[in-house]
Every structure is written in C-alpha cells, then in structure tokens.
Image (cartoon, helix red, strand yellow):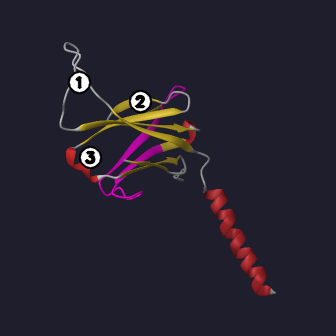
Amino acid sequence: MKKRTLLFVFVSLLFLGNVFSQTDVQILDIVVNPVFEYDTVTEQPIVTENEQLNIMFKINSAANADKVYVLFGTAQDTGDVLSLEADIEQENSTYYIVFNGIQEQIVGYTAQLFLELTPAQKDAYNDISLYVKDNQAEESNRLYFVK
C-alpha cells in the first residue's frame, strides 16, 4: 500500500510540475514565404544569389514573450543548418520582433520576421522549427514547416 501511495505522489508531483512549468504563451499558424524585391524602374524582380524569407506566425501574448527561436535543420528541432534568435521588445504599448537590427511590429496576434539564406543553407534544410520563450524562460509550443 505504501508503494502505491508513494508512486501516486511521485506521479502527481511530476504532472503538477509539468503543468506549472508551462508557459501561457502559445503560437500557431506558421507561414513561410519567399520575398521578391522588384526594381522600381523596370518593375522586374531583382535576381540575387541568396533567398529572402518571410516567416509569419500568430502569438497569443506578446506581452509575456521574450525571444523567438527559428531552427533550420535537416530534421525537426535540430537547427543543424542555421539557428536564429530574435527579441520581442515593447515600445509604449506596441510590441516588435527585433532581428538583425530590424523591427517588425506585431499587429494583433500576427508576428513576422525576415531573413536571408545562402544557397547552401537553402539546399541543406528540410524543416523549420519555431518556438518562443516567455519572460520566465519557459518554452511555448513548437511550430513546424516542412520544405
């Protein structure tokens, strides 16, 4: 009987620890799109060697979020091709994702960031994994995009 009670207490503590250590910050709906720049005179796309990407997602609580992590990998959650970290910052009552010194405003629940991949990085990755850490360094759920 004591073994069952101890087992129940142990399992309950594990469950409660997991419940209380999860963040309230949730993300969903990842969208990854190529970005094309156009020549203002000819209105033709500017051809470059590198690929520009726009990564968009929704976040329920930018006020409680601190960082965005984007992992480009040969498999989910690896980041073995490229790992990026962007900050979430507040100015007045407006929140921004700041990456490479560029601020992208979080509008409503929609957040986005722009980045550039070399041809080698573009060819090497198969999966993009994205997650957010909150102000207490707890991780959100993860979103996945398969190339």
Q: Is residue 66 left or right of residue 54?
A: right
Indicate the secondary structure of the residue bearing disc 1.
loop
Mark 3 vs mark 2: in front: 3
Q: CA distance from mark 3 to mark 2?
A: 23 Å
Q: Quadrant of the N terminus?
A: bottom right
Indicate the secondary structure of the residue bearing disc 3.
helix
Residue denoted by label 1: 45
Q: Is residue 99 left or right of residue 44?
A: right
- For marks 3 and 2, the one nearer the N-term is 2
The residue drawn where x is 75% and y is 86% is 3
User: Is 124 placed above or below 96 here?
Assistant: below
Q: Which residues are magenta?
A: 67-95
Q: Amino acid at mark 2?
A: Glu
Q: Is residue 124 magenta?
A: no
User: Is 104 placed above or below 134 here?
Assistant: above
Q: Which mark is residue 118?
A: none
Q: Which mark is residue 104?
A: 2
For disc 3, the neighbor class at 10 Å (few under 14, some 14 to 19, many from 20) is some
Q: Position of residue 122 (x, y in %)?
A: 26, 46
The residue drawn where x is 69% and y is 69% is 13
- For marks 1 and 2, the one nearer the N-term is 1
User: Is 100 placed above or below 38 here?
Assistant: below
Q: Amino acid at mark 3?
A: Lys
Q: CA distance from mark 3 to mark 1?
A: 19 Å
* Residue 11 falls in image quadrant: bottom right
Q: Amino acid at mark 1?
A: Pro
Q: Position of residue 143 (x, y in %)?
A: 49, 48
Q: Position of residue 60 (x, y in %)?
A: 59, 38
Count of labels shown?
3
Residue denoted by label 3: 122
Q: Is residue 119 left or right of residue 25?
A: left
For disc 1, the neighbor class at 10 Å (few under 14, some 14 to 19, many from 20) is few
